[in-house]
Image (cartoon, grey):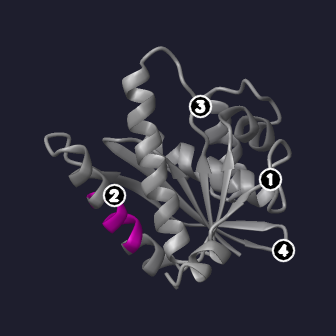
Amino acid sequence: MIILGIDPGSRKTGFGCIEKSGKSLKLLGQGVIQLNAKNSMDQRLLELSMGLEKLIKEYGPSILAIEKAFVKNNIQSALRLGETRGAIMVSGARHSLSVVEYSPAEVKKSVAGNGRADKEQLAKMVRLLCGARDLEFETLDASDAISIAVCHALSSGRSPLSAPRRGGKLSRALGLS
């Protein structure tokens, strides 16, 4: 099973792709889709969609795991994040991927055993679980994305707090695949 983890952002979207074979996890790739902040939002969403298209073709995942949105104080940021997540989900559905969502607390609890784990704890556990103690993460966004993919791998395909959203059937019904 190949899982593409996504940490959505309207300027930088982190990605991490892992392969689960039995109980072992192997990191296939990581990085960031850098979006041009000078472009309009519709252009950034197009850039993001095209970047995801390349990743999906390169890695051939069957699952797209994405972080759920959470709102702090800035409603405009929350709206932008929602638009970004929508573009990511449509890209997954267009390729008949199963799209699953996990909250930050679910990811932390699944990967590090603590829903309030910090980024260093998550990174340490990802290295351990992927058998790559010397792994250097390209960015924190990539590290977060790998954690999301690992969360899905450890959850046996189901989020304990919510049912996954599946894009495959919908995209076939709409004639998109």
Q: Nearer the viewer, residue 85 or 35?
A: 85
Point out the tag, 3 or 4, that comes first from the N-terminus. 4
The answer to which of marks 2 and 3 sits earlier in the sequence is 2
Residue 90 coordinates in the image, percent (x, y): 48, 63
Of the two numbered discs 4 and 1 on the same chain, state the one appearing first in sequence: 4
103 versus 128 height, above or below: above
Mark 2 — residue?
A: 48
Contact check, label 1 and label 3, Cβ < 8 Å: no
Rounded to the nearest angstrom, the CA distance separating label 1 from label 3 is: 26 Å
The residue at which mark 4 appears reads as: 22
In the foreground, 162 or 145: 162
Query: Marks 4/1: CA distance?
Result: 23 Å
To which residue does mark 1 refer?
Answer: 163
User: Which amino acid, mark 4?
Assistant: Gly
Q: Quadrant of residue 60?
A: bottom right
- Front disc: 2 or 4: 2
Give the residue displayed 55% in from the left and 70% down from the top.
93
Q: Secondary structure at mark 4?
A: loop
1 or 3: tag closer to the N-terminus: 3
Whole-angstrom CA distance, mark 1 to mark 2, is: 26 Å
